[in-house]
Image (spheres, rainbow, N blue to C red):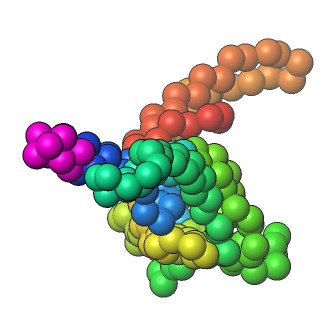
Amino acid sequence: MKSVQFIIGVAVLALLLQASCVAEGPPAVAVANEVEPAVFFPGDEGTISLTLKNTATQSSVTEGNFKPEGSEGSYTRTTTVLTVSAGIESVRLLSKRCVEWLSARTRSSEFFRIGALGPGESIRLSFPVRVSKFCEDGTYFPEVLVSVENGEDVRFPIPVRVDSSALEMLAEIPPEISLGDAKEVQVTVANNRPSAVSGV
């Protein structure tokens, strides 16, 4: 009799441990970013793109109900499946120096009422930005603030690099070009910047 009680007690404990291990808390939102161009020249315009992802997965909680020994009835097991969605209330770009939102293209520096992201779902948002002409070389960290309705808010710094290094150009021009003649002019361009040059 005692061995049966012991086995039932162990089974209840195992089910409770299983339930606590599988259950999930509030949804968590992860942020990934992409900055274009990779390195800004003072006065440049570009884009900060964000991908918001709900890292929650479908979770299941298993509950076991037992009746005392000797009572009528049987062991019942109930499985409840919970789906955790992340409600995104707003996404804001916060910057104190150099990097500014291009308000001329949009109404504000904030996205409102984006909606709910289901488990594993993601959304991509883009902020058009400009780097001040008077910005010194260095790396700046404007922050993105994500307000989550039913979870923890996210504050995420985004590195924006600024480099004023100029291109160097060397031109080889013939000393004389007569009317009607065709001569070749050679231009050599040296890129001293940490980013690639797309055209000359």
Q: In the image, what residue occupies the spot 47% across and 65% down?
A: 26
Q: Which residues are magenta?
A: 1-10
Q: In the image, what residue occupies the spot 74% across and 75% down?
A: 112
Q: In the image, what residue occupies the spot 53% across and 65% down?
A: 42
Residue at the outermost left position = 2
Residue 134 appears in the figure: no
Viewer-proximal residue among 187 and 154: 154
Residue 2 appears in the figure: yes
Residue 52 located within the stretch drawn in magenta: no
Q: Provide residue 11's location: percent of width, then percent of height.
A: 25, 43
Q: How many marks?
A: 0
Residue at the outermost bottom position = 96
Quadrant in the rendering for residue 197? top right
Q: Provide residue 47's location: percent of width, then percent of height.
A: 64, 56
180 with respect to 25 (left or right): right
Q: In the image, what residue occupies the spot 48% across and 84% down?
A: 96
151 with respect to 10 (left or right): right
Residue 8 located within the stretch drawn in magenta: yes
Q: Provide residue 36's location: percent of width, then percent of height.
A: 59, 49
- Viewport quadrant of the N terminus: top left
The relative height of residue 84 versus residue 121 in the rendered view (above or below) is below
Q: Provide residue 83's location: percent of width, then percent of height.
A: 60, 53
Viewer-proximal residue among 108 and 198: 108
Prevailing secondary structure class for the magenta stretch in the rendered image: helix
